[in-house]
Image (cartoon, helix red, strand yellow):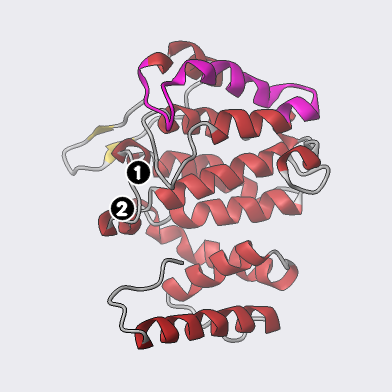
């Protein structure tokens, strides 16, 4: 599903496709992955909806890991992303995984794991990262960011904290699409709520960076760990530049 464009150059987006249609109508064998092509993906993706939490946990690694390599968005990533976005509201994804199988706490919702992956992929497809040469991305994913945002947005109010926080982190890179900049004030409110309750290091880093990027003063929102991390990276950068390097350090 690739969006067409109107005369103003803005993509005309319809709703998400039916997930079963994505599995059965995509020419998976012709889509590039890090290794080979996507013939194995339909079966692996279908297991994301299996009633067995262990099967779902394994499917997260098998299906999503298959198109995740070196911060690159491959041809097969686009239909995988459409499938993931289309099943975010499926009842099976609300249930907990066997957390040990995916390196998370037991009971981590499959829905949160899907959001984690979609947000990470959206960051890899970020226009600034791609323009700077830090990432390689299929342009179709970037065009579809408004569609993915619409799928993720309702989960900002999910009853499960892990899902709410994963949804917020996923919306941040999606909201860098030019059509979505007007949503940033709402996201900033959610970001402040996360910072008031979460100790998750990566999530705090993402939302603090986003708030600063959007022009908000974050000094009153940081805890002691946030300040320590920020000062650590500031020292690393200073040492990097003092050593005569021409580029920013790779972090």
Q: Residues within 10 Å of mark 2 (few under 14, many from 20)?
A: some
Which residue corresponds to the image point at 43% horizontal and 39% vertical from the top-left? 147
Residue 53 place in picture, x, y as percent:
79, 29
Q: Which mark is residue 142?
A: 1
For the question of whether residue 87 can be seen, the reply is no
Is 227 situated above or below 141?
Answer: below
Residue 153 place in picture, x, y as percent:
56, 47
For the residues labelled 2 and 1, the Cα–Cα distance comes to 10 Å
Q: Farthest residue toward the front?
A: 243
Q: Does the CB distance between marks 2 and 1 fall below 8 Å?
A: yes
Left or right, 1 with reference to 61: left
Is 47 within the magenta? yes
Is 99 within the magenta? no
Left or right, 17 with reference to 199: left
Residue located beneath label 2 in the image: 130
Which residue corresponds to the image point at 29% horizontal and 40% vertical from the top-left? 139
Which residue corresponds to the image point at 72% horizontal and 33% vertical from the top-left? 57
Quadrant including the N terminus: top left
Residue 203 place in picture, x, y as percent:
62, 62
Instruction: Specify which label sits upstream in the sequence, 2 or 1.
Output: 2
Residue 126 place in picture, x, y as percent:
37, 53
User: Of residues 133 and 152, which is closer to you in this image?
Assistant: 133
Mark 2 residue element = helix
Which residue corresponds to the image point at 63% horizontal and 46% vertical from the top-left? 155
Mark 1 residue element = helix
User: Of residues 117 and 241, which is closer to you in this image?
Assistant: 241
User: Of residues 240 and 83, which is closer to you in this image?
Assistant: 240
Is 15 situated above or below 162?
Answer: above
Q: Residues within 10 Å of mark 1 (few under 14, many from 20)?
A: many
Is 82 situated above or below 198?
Answer: above
Q: Farthest residue toward the top?
A: 24
- Which range is magenta? 30-56
């Amino acid at each position: 599903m690739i969006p067409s464009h109107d005369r103003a150059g803005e993509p005309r987006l319809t709703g998400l496709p039916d997930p079963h249609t994505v599995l059965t109508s995509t020419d998976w064998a012709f889509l590039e992955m890090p290794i080979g092509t996507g013939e194995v993906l339909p079966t692996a993706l279908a297991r994301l909806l299996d009633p067995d939490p262990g099967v779902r946990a394994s499917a997260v690694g098998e299906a999503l890991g298959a198109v995740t390599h070196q911060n690159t968005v491959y041809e097969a990533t686009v239909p995988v992303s459409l499938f993931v976005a289309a099943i975010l509201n499926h009842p099976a994804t609300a249930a907990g995984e066997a957390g040990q199988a995916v390196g998370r706490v037991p009971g981590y919702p499959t829905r949160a794991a899907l959001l984690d992956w979609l947000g990470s992929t959206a960051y890899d497809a970020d226009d600034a990262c791609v323009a700077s040469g830090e990432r390689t991305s299929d342009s179709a994913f970037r065009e579809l960011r408004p569609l993915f945002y619409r799928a993720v947005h309702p989960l900002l109010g999910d009853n499960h904290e892990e899902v709410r926080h994963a949804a917020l982190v996923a919306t941040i890179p999606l909201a860098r699409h030019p059509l979505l900049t007007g949503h940033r004030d709402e996201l900033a409110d959610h970001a402040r709520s996360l910072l008031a309750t979460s100790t998750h290091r990566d999530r705090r880093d993402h939302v603090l960076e986003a708030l600063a990027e959007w022009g908000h003063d974050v000094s009153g929102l940081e805890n002691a760990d946030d300040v320590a991390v920020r000062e650590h990276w500031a020292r690393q950068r200073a040492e990097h530049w003092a050593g005569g390097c021409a580029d920013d350090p790779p972090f």
